[in-house]
């Protein structure tokens, strides 16, 4: 363009610019076409069989059903204002029996009912060592540790020499203890009703039956209304296998803390004339089995992965 | 405790069926295990018959063909195998359709070619006795052929099988249960069976009794019976014993059992002529003294056991079992009936020490009351006269007498309300307590109540009385309220939250939680190649040798369950357990119980898919990755160092360190250990004392987003003997303050380029400043410091990148 006469330069320059722009456009268009084509070809090549199995990220494992149930129960009672306390599984006769007002003749003390730790010369010696048969010893330990008001649950392992479809030598309990100036048996019923509804459904009712435990007075056993049937009859008209047709299922033992138990912790601020309370104890496995329809306690301890994965 | 309704109804007969009685008992505090039918059913088929003729069976020597009038016109032909059957007898007959105690239905039959239209019954066939050799011959008095047999004999009853709680030994007798049924249902209670009391108080001069230990024998009573005729008991009594679960033996022995079942008070009958010297002494045994008991054993006693001795030495272990020497036999004519009261805990101890439990000891050990002794004596006297044609001698030996008056207890109306959460009107309380045979007197704020003597030990405090009122008034009347709490609030502790977070962190990485046994066998340390064996808690009375100790590591149960799952076809295992281990200490009788958490990996790190059909098997670094995921979730800085554990692969074992302290182990399980569990694959695992992991402090904000970070990679050549952790430690120390993180991302070995015995670690460095964008110069200076430190401290050389 520079060699052209000046009068032509403008027109030629403009034309050249236009031609260049057009060329560039064409090239760009072609590039886009090619690129789109290429993309299309690549995508076509990337086609997969969408029906092949997924390739998931690593999957979660599972908490054991006992742990799931334990946490569920803990959370219900935390919501009701209870703290969670834990105590030793290897205990003394004093905490496991004596301070819980067990008569020296109580059959639970026998070698047939309690595991004792070597060396045990005399099973009535308060300092003899055993595997706790219930989570109740922590009632006394907790009261020794802190003055009232006391609202605790105590989850943990317990041991009894027994083995069949409904007993394993090791199992888990949750103890409850509420001590204050004005705790009533009605409060026990209300607390356990709230628990039963949280765990087994809002329709549930509870009932208390009088019973005997050394460390509560009055003592009760607590039943929850059966969630598998209507008045003992299943939907298909059979006698309910879960409650055996009674419409009620026993879930735990409970009662008002016996004044003799307070006597053991009087010096820590528990004067039986000034405070009163309730206590209860339930088996975690039993709650889990009822809730999930597990027929045999022992499968919980087989720990077969195929079982664990179900929950 | 078995309670035949037929027997119960003699004393209290509410208009309710067995299930309804059971329900009332259950709702008032007496647990009913089950209701059992006892005896026969289809009762219309059991009648009285009269044998008109008994002829020899034509084809069988031992059978008779009988013609029996059963009251319905045509006499029945019945083939009978009993040797004692004879014309003229009044007998019990089962007609076809009868249902026998074992549930079988009697049918018409042909016996050796002769039709038999029913059965003439022996006692055992009705479950009212044990006699089988001959048929039962009924006394004719007032019996007519065809009369329903159930009007004559107790051939069918429901039995309530009760669980009597240890505080209610008074309910270990039928009359005690009748009292409860009375209080629970309002049905009338008959006077007690001891209301009629033949026999007389006063001295019994012909016999000498000495009680040397009144502390262990609060009461001892005895009566003497002459002209005793030993023979079988009558059918009604045998039937009741059978229904209550006792085998009839002979009248005197049966009377002692019957009276015990009725009154809860055990008795013992001596053959008076076999008591040497006509004297008995109740005393503590001498150490090592021996007694031959009724069960044919020789028992060796100690000084805390009580025995009854005559002039020739011990005859009985008090309250536990009688002696063979003085027992009643077929030729007995004179009986000394002993009914005593013993110290419960002492009997319990004796029974425990001797390993000898009896119906008597299980009652005595729950502490009966002294008054019960004379009650049982009265009932036994009636029956000895009635059933053994005996004469009771004037006088009764009675050492100790009745107990002190039961304690009077103030029952405050307000306290009832306060303990139950609902009031009970005073008159209602009085009504309930009087039905339970308490006496009540009005007091200003409630009632002064006195329990009956038989509840003396059980009812000692106001709470005990409130329980009586509450259980009979009905617990269903109580409200369902929540505690007022007075400001108490509930939460998990930081430690409890940490434990939950730890388990959740493992679950999130795909591990399944298992719950293993706290028990282990004595061979576990050896299988884990632990030498010396770590001290462990050992049990006195394990259920088996495999469960005779408590675990000191979670590894045993993880390996057990790994083997179980591998054997059941699960090839990939990612398991963990969290729980206590039990470590004996020198400080006290109780072991330490730290909360451990342990994980075990076997098989592919990821599930195989069509894209990656053979992912690598979990190894040391897979376990380390899981551990990292766990401890990162707990925000705990940690470290590992080379370590040797006998159960780990010697080249793939590490100690887990937190703030320099060893808190666990990590590694691949030694192949010999895995083999002991029949596992041939690589097993990677770790175990950590979770109690050694501190609750992390609250994390505080750091500005990591306002200014860009600078990343670069650094290759460091160091001798093979230098651990990666050492390199990183030097890098981190010398990289301060700008270095934000340093991680090894590649490991390279090549003798040709790096030299023999050297390794090249590629480290990714991230630099950052909270207040500015870093310049190249700043980063270069920091990098120089790092390179210098590596060279100076580790002999390392930074390779050109």
Image: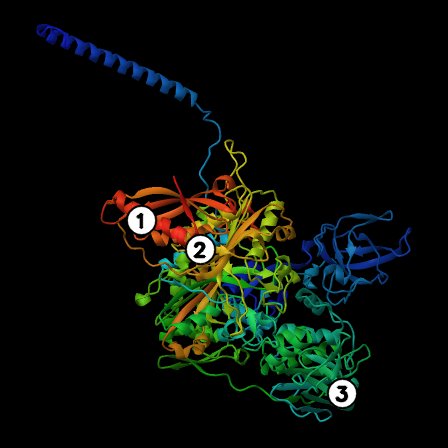
The reply to whether callout 3 and callout 2 are in contact (CB within 8 Å) is no
Mark-to-mark CA distance, 1 and 3: 101 Å
**Residue identifier under label 3:** B313
Residue at coordinates 37% horizontally, 18% vertically from top-left?
A38
Tell me which corner region of the image, top left, top right, bottom left or bottom right, holds residue B765: top left
Q: Residue beneath label 2, please? A: B639
Q: Position of residue B693 (x, y in %)?
A: 42, 60
User: Residue B780 location in percent, x, y?
Assistant: 30, 45
Which of the image's four quarters has the C terminus of chain B? Answer: top left
Q: Position of residue B429 (x, y in %)?
A: 42, 73
The local crowd at label 3, few if under 14, some if 14 to 19, many if 20 or more residues have their Cα within 10 Å, is some
Q: Nearer the viewer, residue B713 or B203?
A: B713
In the picture of the structure, the residue carrying the numbered disc 1 is B782
Q: CA distance from mark 3 to mark 2?
A: 77 Å
Residue A247 visible in rendering: no
Work out whether B799 lies above or below B365. above
């Amino acid at each position: 363009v520079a060699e052209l006469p000046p009068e032509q330069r403008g027109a030629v320059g403009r034309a050249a610019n236009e031609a260049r722009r057009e060329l560039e456009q064409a090239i760009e268009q072609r590039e886009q076409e090619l690129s789109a084509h290429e993309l299309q070809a690549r995508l076509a090549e990337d086609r997969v069989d969408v029906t092949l199995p997924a390739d998931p990220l690593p999957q979660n494992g599972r908490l054991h059903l006992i742990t799931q149930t334990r946490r569920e129960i803990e959370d219900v009672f935390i919501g009701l204002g209870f703290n969670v306390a834990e105590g030793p599984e290897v205990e003394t006769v004093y905490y496991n029996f004596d301070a819980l007002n067990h008569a020296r003749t109580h059959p639970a003390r026998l070698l047939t009912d309690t595991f004792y730790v070597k060396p045990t010369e005399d099973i009535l010696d308060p300092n003899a060592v055993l595997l706790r048969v219930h989570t109740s010893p922590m009632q006394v330990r907790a009261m020794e540790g802190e003055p009232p008001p006391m609202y605790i649950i105590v989850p943990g392992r317990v041991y009894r020499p027994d083995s069949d479809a409904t007993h394993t030598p090791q199992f888990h309990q949750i103890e409850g203890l509420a001590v204050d100036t004005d705790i009533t048996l009605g409060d026990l019923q209300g607390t356990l009703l709230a628990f039963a509804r949280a765990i087994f459904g809002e329709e549930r009712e509870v009932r208390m039956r009088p019973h005997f435990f050394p460390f509560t007075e009055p003592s009760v056993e607590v039943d929850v209304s059966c969630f598998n049937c209507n008045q003992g009859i299943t939907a298909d008209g059979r006698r309910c296998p879960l409650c055996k047709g009674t419409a009620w299922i026993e879930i735990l033992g409970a009662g008002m803390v016996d004044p003799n138990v307070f006597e053991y912790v009087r010096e820590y601020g528990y004067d039986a004339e000034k405070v009163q309370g309730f206590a209860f104890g339930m088996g975690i496995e039993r709650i889990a089995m009822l809730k999930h329809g597990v027929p045999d306690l022992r499968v919980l301890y087989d720990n077969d992965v195929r079982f664990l994965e179900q929950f | 405790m078995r309670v035949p309704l037929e027997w119960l109804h003699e004393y209290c007969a509410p208009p309710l069926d067995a299930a309804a009685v059971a329900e009332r008992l259950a709702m008032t505090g007496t647990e009913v295990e089950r209701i059992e039918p006892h005896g026969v059913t289809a009762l219309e088929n059991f009648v009285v018959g009269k044998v008109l003729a008994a002829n020899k069976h034509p084809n069988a020597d031992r059978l008779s063909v009988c013609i029996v009038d059963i009251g319905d016109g045509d006499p029945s032909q019945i083939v009978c195998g009993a040797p004692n059957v004879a014309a003229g007898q009044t007998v019990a007959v089962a007609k076809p359709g009868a249902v026998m105690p074992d549930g079988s239905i009697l049918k018409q039959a042909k016996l050796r070619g002769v039709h038999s239209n029913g059965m003439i019954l022996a006692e055992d066939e009705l479950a009212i006795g044990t006699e089988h050799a001959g048929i039962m011959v009924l006394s004719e008095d007032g019996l007519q052929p065809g009369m329903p047999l159930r009007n004559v004999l107790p051939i069918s009853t429901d039995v309530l099988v009760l669980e009597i709680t240890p505080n209610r030994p008074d309910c270990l007798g039928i009359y005690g249960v009748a009292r409860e049924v009375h209080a629970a249902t309002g049905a009338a209670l008959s006077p007690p069976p001891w209301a009629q009391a033949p026999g007389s108080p006063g001295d019994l001069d012909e016999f000498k009794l000495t009680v040397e230990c009144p502390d262990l024998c609060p009461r001892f009573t005895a009566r003497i019976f002459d002209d005793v005729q030993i023979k079988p008991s009558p059918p009604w009594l045998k039937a009741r014993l059978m229904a209550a679960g006792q085998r009839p033996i002979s009248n005197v022995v049966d009377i002692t059992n019957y009276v015990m079942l009725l009154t809860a008070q055990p008795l013992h009958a001596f053959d008076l002529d076999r008591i040497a010297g006509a004297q008995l002494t109740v005393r503590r045994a001498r150490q090592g003294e021996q007694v031959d008991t009724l069960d044919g054993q020789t028992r060796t006693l100690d000084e805390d056991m009580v025995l009854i001795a005559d002039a020739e030495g011990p005859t009985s272990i008090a309250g536990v079992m009688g002696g063979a020497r003085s027992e009643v036999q077929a030729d007995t004519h004179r009986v000394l009936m002993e009914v005593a009261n013993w110290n419960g805990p002492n009997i319990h101890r004796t029974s425990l020490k001797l390993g000898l439990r009896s119906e008597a000891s299980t009652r005595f050990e729950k502490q009966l009351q002294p008054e019960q002794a004379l009650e049982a004596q009265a009932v036994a006297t009636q029956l000895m006269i009635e059933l053994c044609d005996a004469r009771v001698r004037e006088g009764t030996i009675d050492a100790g007498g009745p107990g002190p008056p039961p304690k009077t207890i103030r029952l405050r109306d307000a306290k009832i309300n306060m303990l139950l959460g609902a009031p009970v009107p005073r008159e209602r309380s009085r009504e309930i307590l009087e039905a339970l045979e308490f006496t009540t007197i009005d007091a200003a704020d409630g009632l002064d109540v006195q329990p009956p003597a038989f509840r003396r030990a059980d009812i000692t405090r106001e709470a005990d009385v409130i329980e009586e009122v509450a259980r009979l008034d009905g617990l269903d009347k109580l409200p369902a309220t929540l505690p007022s709490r007075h400001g108490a609030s509930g939460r998990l502790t930081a430690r409890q939250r940490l434990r939950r977070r730890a388990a959740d962190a493992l679950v999130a990485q795909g591990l399944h939680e298992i719950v293993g046994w706290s028990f282990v066998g004595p061979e576990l340390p050896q299988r884990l190649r632990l030498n010396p064996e770590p001290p462990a808690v050992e049990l006195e009375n394990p259920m088996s040798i495999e469960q005779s100790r408590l675990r000191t590591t979670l590894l045993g149960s993880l390996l057990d369950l790994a083997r179980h799952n591998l054997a059941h076809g699960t090839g990939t295992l990612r398991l963990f357990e969290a729980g206590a281990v039990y470590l004996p200490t020198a400080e006290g009788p109780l072991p330490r119980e730290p909360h451990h958490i342990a994980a075990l990996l076997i098989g592919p790190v990821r599930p195989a898919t069509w894209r990656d059909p053979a992912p690598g098997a979990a190894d040391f670094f897979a376990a380390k990755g899981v551990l990292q995921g766990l401890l990162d979730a707990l925000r705990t800085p940690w470290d590992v160092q080379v370590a040797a554990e006998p159960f780990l692969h010697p080249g793939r074992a590490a100690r887990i360190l937190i703030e320099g302290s060893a808190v666990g182990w990590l590694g691949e399980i030694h192949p010999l250990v895995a083999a002991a569990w029949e596992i041939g694959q690589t097993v990677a695992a770790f175990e950590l004392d979770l109690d050694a992991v501190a609750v992390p402090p609250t994390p505080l904000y750091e500005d990591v987003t306002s200014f860009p970070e600078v990343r670069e990679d650094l290759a460091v050549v160091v001798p093979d003997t230098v651990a990666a952790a050492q390199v990183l430690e030097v890098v981190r120390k010398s990289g301060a303050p700008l270095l934000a993180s340093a991680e090894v991302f590649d490991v390279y070995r090549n003798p040709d380029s790096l030299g023999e015995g050297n390794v090249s670690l590629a480290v990714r460095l991230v630099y950052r400043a909270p207040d500015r964008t870093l310049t190249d110069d700043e980063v270069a200076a920091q990098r120089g410091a790092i390179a210098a430190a590596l060279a100076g401290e580790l002999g390392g050389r930074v390779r050109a990148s």
